[in-house]
Image (cartoon, coloured by chain):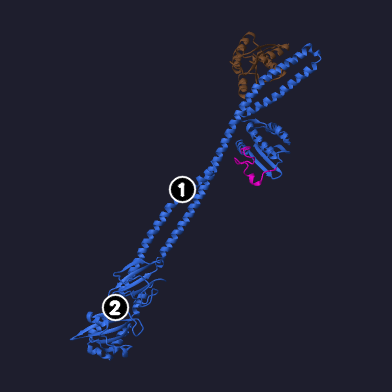
């Protein structure tokens, strides 16, 4: 049983449902939401430690959502996820404080590894502050 | 621009240049020559006129002198004195000693009888009566008579001068025969040049002196009839060949002195001037033609170069636009495929998770399920590799300076063409220097260069062959070299220095633009590198690319 709370934000429902199911099967406390707006709501209710965030979404896109998240809960770590490897949005995300940037499709174990690293970083920063 | 249009423009420039430079030249030459010609002709005609006038005057003077000599002799002596032949002989000797032109001297009474005679024909002439002679009547009525030239008994051209003397109630005549040699000599002095002539004619157009070319004494000259001439004048007359004629009247005898000159001789300096002018004009013409051709050729060459340069840069621009569009499309496709791939992967992963937990593990087909899921994951990974490569390709189309790994780019370029090469049975061998440093360059453009050259190599080989790739760090110059060698047919020597020219292609029409190597060349220049080629017919071609290792 992992200690961190995870949230996955992706507009692709099939992807979202499946990844949430798989993560839950691994005993991870995970919430899945379909848009940036929902993500910001859940952020207030559940305050997840790590968020996996799709860059390209209708309405509020990943970069914008990231900005809002960092405004509300600066210590929350965000891993950007996209099917598009555009350098600018990657760099932009990193500049806005994302922990890392990964490209779809990615093996779940690799992704989990990144999540753990992000959580460790968060713990470190919380310890310092 | 089309070949024909170039030709047309070439002619237009040449003709315009020639027209504008030759017309003034010709006008200048013609006007100059005309001016010179008219003034020179006027001067030489004036010279002839003066000469003819002077000659005629001196002949007149000669006649006057003879006449006055005779008349003073006659008037200072009485008939009685001169009738004495001995005395007359003495006088003849005296005047003969002063002027050898006198041939004889006679005294004739008013009845026409010879009273005294001194000269070589004493016996014949002494008894002749002149009463019915034309000249006798003339002298009786006018007092002085000068005859035309005649041959007489002597068969020597001569003429006579007779003066009438009135003494008391009788009149007598003193008559002298004068050798016309002296006049001939005076006239001959006017024979100018090689073809010049001068002679005297009487009122009936009969020659009185021996001309040089124009006929025989006492005959009509072979020249136009100038017998009616009055003053002094110069004119150009002739049929076929023109001659300059100057005529002047000898007043005492109403003879006409004719001086004839060959204008080509008289005007030789003028003709030479004409020749020189023509020569200069011709020289100028050749110079202008040469100059026009040279400048036009230089101009056309420059025009062609600029046009080609423009075409190359146009083509490069088009190419980069094309590549940018291609990149966008590739990125879009990759993105769209990546999303469903991610879903498939998650679903497959979920099934695998379930396979682990449920009783299915005991089912007979469990092994089959597990294997199928592994295969699905494997092929998802395969598809992912392709989409990621597409994305990498798209990303590199944006011109950026980045640290690039030459070996990596080369390997990737090869991977694009591997399939084609395998299909044609071409073996691509790689020999990469492992310690190659990364360089600051544009990966996409480098890749374009590598792809161009590799493509050409594959096309050159056709089927069955090998391509050797070698990278090297030349530490001495701190340069990275990339060698791409094929064992194709090679490039003929005469084509070798043209292969980097735009639009030079050996591929069939429609297959190659002839711009690949030209673009590669300019890319390498832009990136601060170089591209070299070595080729041997029958052995193969090696392209070497040098890049500064920064």
Q: Position of residue B273 (x, y in %)?
A: 42, 61
Q: Position of residue B303 (x, y in %)?
A: 53, 43
Q: CA distance from mark 2 to mark 1?
A: 70 Å
Which residue in the structure is indicated by mark 2?
B63
Q: Quadrant of residue B492?
A: top right
Which residue in the structure is indicated by mark 1?
B16
Q: Position of residue B348 (x, y in %)?
A: 73, 17
Q: Mark 2: which secondary structure?
A: helix
Residue lying furthest top in this view? A45
Q: Say which chain tag 2 marks.
A: B
Q: Which colour is chain B painted?
A: blue
On the picture, is B262 further left or further right than A109? left
Assign the C terminus of chain A to one quadrant of the image.
Answer: top right
Q: Mark 1: which secondary structure?
A: helix
Is residue B407 part of the magenta span, yes or no? no
Residue lying furthest front in this view? B132
Q: Which colour is chain A painted?
A: brown
Is B474 in front, or is B273?
B273
User: What predominant SS class does the magenta segment belong to?
Assistant: loop
> Looking at the image, which residue is at 63% across and 44% down?
B497
């Amino acid at each position: 049983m992992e200690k961190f709370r995870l949230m996955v934000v992706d507009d692709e429902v099939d992807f979202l449902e499946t990844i949430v199911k798989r993560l839950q099967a691994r005993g991870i406390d995970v919430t899945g939401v379909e848009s940036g707006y929902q993500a910001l709501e859940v952020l207030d209710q559940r305050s997840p430690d790590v968020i996996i965030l799709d860059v390209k979404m209708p309405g509020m896109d990943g970069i914008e959502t990231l900005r809002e998240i960092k405004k509300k809960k600066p210590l929350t770590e965000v891993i950007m996820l996209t099917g598009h490897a555009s350098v600018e949005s990657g760099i932009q995300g990193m500049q806005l404080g994302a922990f890392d940037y990964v490209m779809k499709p990615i093996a779940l174990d690799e992704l989990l590894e990144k999540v753990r690293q992000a959580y460790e970083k968060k713990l470190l920063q919380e310890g310092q502050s | 621009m089309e070949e024909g249009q170039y030709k047309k423009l070439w002619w237009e420039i040449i003709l315009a240049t020639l027209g504008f430079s030759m017309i003034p030249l010709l006008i200048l030459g013609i006007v100059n020559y005309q001016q010179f010609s008219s003034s020179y002709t006027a001067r030489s005609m004036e010279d002839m006129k003066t000469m003819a006038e002077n000659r005629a005057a001196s002949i007149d003077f000669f006649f006057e002198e003879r006449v006055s000599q005779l008349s003073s002799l006659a008037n200072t002596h009485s008939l009685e004195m001169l009738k004495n032949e001995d005395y007359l002989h003495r006088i003849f000797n005296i005047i003969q000693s002063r002027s050898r032109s006198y041939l004889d001297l006679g005294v004739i009474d008013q009845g026409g009888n010879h009273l005294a005679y001194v000269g070589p024909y004493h016996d014949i002439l002494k008894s002749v009566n002149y009463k019915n002679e034309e000249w006798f009547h003339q002298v009786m009525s006018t007092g002085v008579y000068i005859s035309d030239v005649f041959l007489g008994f002597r068969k020597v051209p001569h003429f006579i001068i007779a003066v009438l003397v009135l003494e008391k109630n009788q009149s007598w005549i003193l008559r002298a025969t004068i050798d016309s040699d002296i006049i001939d000599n005076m006239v001959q002095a006017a024979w100018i040049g090689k073809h010049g002539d001068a002679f005297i004619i009487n009122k009936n157009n009969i020659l009185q002196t021996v001309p040089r070319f124009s006929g025989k004494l006492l005959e009509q000259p072979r020249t136009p009839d100038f017998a009616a001439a009055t003053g002094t004048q110069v004119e150009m007359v002739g049929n076929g060949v023109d001659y300059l004629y100057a005529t002047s009247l000898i007043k005492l005898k109403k003879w006409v002195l004719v001086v004839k000159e060959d204008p080509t001789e008289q005007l030789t300096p003028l003709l030479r001037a004409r020749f020189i002018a023509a020569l200069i004009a011709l020289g100028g013409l050749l110079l202008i033609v040469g100059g026009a051709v040279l400048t036009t050729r230089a101009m056309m060459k420059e025009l062609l170069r600029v046009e080609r340069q423009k075409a190359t840069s146009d083509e490069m621009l088009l190419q980069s636009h094309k590549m940018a569009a291609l990149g966008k499309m590739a990125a879009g496709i990759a993105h769209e495929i990546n999303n469903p791939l991610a879903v498939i992967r998650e679903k497959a992963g979920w099934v695998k998770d379930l396979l682990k937990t449920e009783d299915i593990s005991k089912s007979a087909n469990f092994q089959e399920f597990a294997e199928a899921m592994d295969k699905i994951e494997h092929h998802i990974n395969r598809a992912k590799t392709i989409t990621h490569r597409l994305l990498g390709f798209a990303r590199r189309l944006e011109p950026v300076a980045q640290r690039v790994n030459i070996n990596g780019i080369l390997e990737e370029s090869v991977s694009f063409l591997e399939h084609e090469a395998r299909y044609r049975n071409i073996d691509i061998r790689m020999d990469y220097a492992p310690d190659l440093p990364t360089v600051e360059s544009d990966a996409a453009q480098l890749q374009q260069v590598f792809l161009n050259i590799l493509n050409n190599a594959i096309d050159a080989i056709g089927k069955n062959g090998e391509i050797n790739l070698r990278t090297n760090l030349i530490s001495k110059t701190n340069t990275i070299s990339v060698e791409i060698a094929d064992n194709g047919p090679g490039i003929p020597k005469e084509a070798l220095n043209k292969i980097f020219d735009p639009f030079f292609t050996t591929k069939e029409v429609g297959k190659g633009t002839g711009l690949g190597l030209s673009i590669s060349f300019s890319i390498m220049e832009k990136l601060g590198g170089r591209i070299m080629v070595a080729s041997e017919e029958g052995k193969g071609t090696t392209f070497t690319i040098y890049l500064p290792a920064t």
